[in-house]
Image: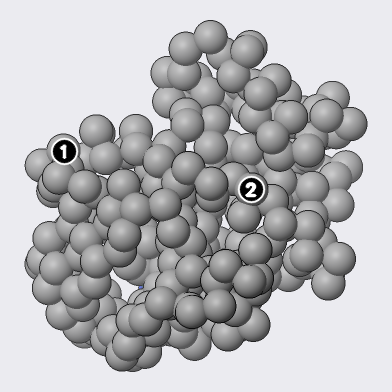
């Protein structure tokens, strides 16, 4: 599925966060959304996921207009927020049950075991989230994001705060999960884009500065 944003603007009071941004992505690619802190990445993602309303501009997932079909859009989108807010006292299984029920997932038990397997959480599923390393917490966040089998994944700074080994593992997992999905992944690190993305969109001070394909994609995979 493709993501299309057209003439999107957003202000927080007098602070302009997005200044008339437009971009379009192809399906089944990992798109790096690159920009420094404050560029407008999270704001764009919060609008795409329906956390913030569209006030000015338009967004589509394929032909679903987010303004008029936000529920349908939610079903097609999985979201990993920045700083991954998990319920630390919950068990991994419990967290996934909770997330699955929010999305009215069918055959819950079967789906949860599949997601646990895909995210490499087999050994951790009966632990409390607070007992897990940051890398495994991030796996739980990704498991929550894919529980309803979305075709679009929106990942806000998914490797920030992880140590170098955890970064490698989470990048690898994102690549695996991305096989049948369109992924928009924000980062302030060009390295991250080079490591896993097929395409890059550069945002700075609320404006899109550039968008291009990364050519050596095939060799890197
Ligand atoms: P990011 O790393 O994406 O820039 P921030 O650290 O700026 O995120 O923001 C963290 C949280 O605080 C976000 O939910 C954001 O919406 C909110 N926030 C950011 N800047 C401000 C601000 N100037 N006033 C109030 N809330 C803000
Ligand atoms: P990024 O994710 O690229 O770091 P954000 O989308 O978080 O950027 O922020 C874009 C701009 O909007 C920044 O100047 C930030 O301080 C401001 N901002 C973000 N959230 C809020 C908020 N809740 N209230 C006020 N200003 C905000």
In the picture, measured across the screen, residue 197 lies left or right of residue 136, that is left
Which residue occupies 63% across, 13% down?
110
Residue 81 point in image, percent of width and height: 52, 55
For label 1, being within 8 Å of ligand 2 is answered: no
Which residue occupies 76% across, 66% down?
167
Q: Is mark 2 on a helix, strand or loop?
A: helix
In the picture, measured across the screen, residue 95 lies left or right of residue 204, that is right
Query: Can you see residue 48?
Result: no
Residue 136 point in image, percent of width and height: 79, 47
Figure check: 133 above or below 158: above
Which residue occupies 57% across, 24% down?
98
Figure check: 1 above or below 56: above
For label 2, being within 8 Å of ligand 2 is answered: no
Q: Where residue 69 is drawn, which disc sits there?
A: 1
Figure check: 126 above or below 155: above
Q: Where residue 176 is drawn, which disc sits there?
A: 2
Q: Is mark 1 on a helix, strand or loop?
A: loop
Quarter-of-image position of residue 48:
bottom left
């Amino acid at each position: 599925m493709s993501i299309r944003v057209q003439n999107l603007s957003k202000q927080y009071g007098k602070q302009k966060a997005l200044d008339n941004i437009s971009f379009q992505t192809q399906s089944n690619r990992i798109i790096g959304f690159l920009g420094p802190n404050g560029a407008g990445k999270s704001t764009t993602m919060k609008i795409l996921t329906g956390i913030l309303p569209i006030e000015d501009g338009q967004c589509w997932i394929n032909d679903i207009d987010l303004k008029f079909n936000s529920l349908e859009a939610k079903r097609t989108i999985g979201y990993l927020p920045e700083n991954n807010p998990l319920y630390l006292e919950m068990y991994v299984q419990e967290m996934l049950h909770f997330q699955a029920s929010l999305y009215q997932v069918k055959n819950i038990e079967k789906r949860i075991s599949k997601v646990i397997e895909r995210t490499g959480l087999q050994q951790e599923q009966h632990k409390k989230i607070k007992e897990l390393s940051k890398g495994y917490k991030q796996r739980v966040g990704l498991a929550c994001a894919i529980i309803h089998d979305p075709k679009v994944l929106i990942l806000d700074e998914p490797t920030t705060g992880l140590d170098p080994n955890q970064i490698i593992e989470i990048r690898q997992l994102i690549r695996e999960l991305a096989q049948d999905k369109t992924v928009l992944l924000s980062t302030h690190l060009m390295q991250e884009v080079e490591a896993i993305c097929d395409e890059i969109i550069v945002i700075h001070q609320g404006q899109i500065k550039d968008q291009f394909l990364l050519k050596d994609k095939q060799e890197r995979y």
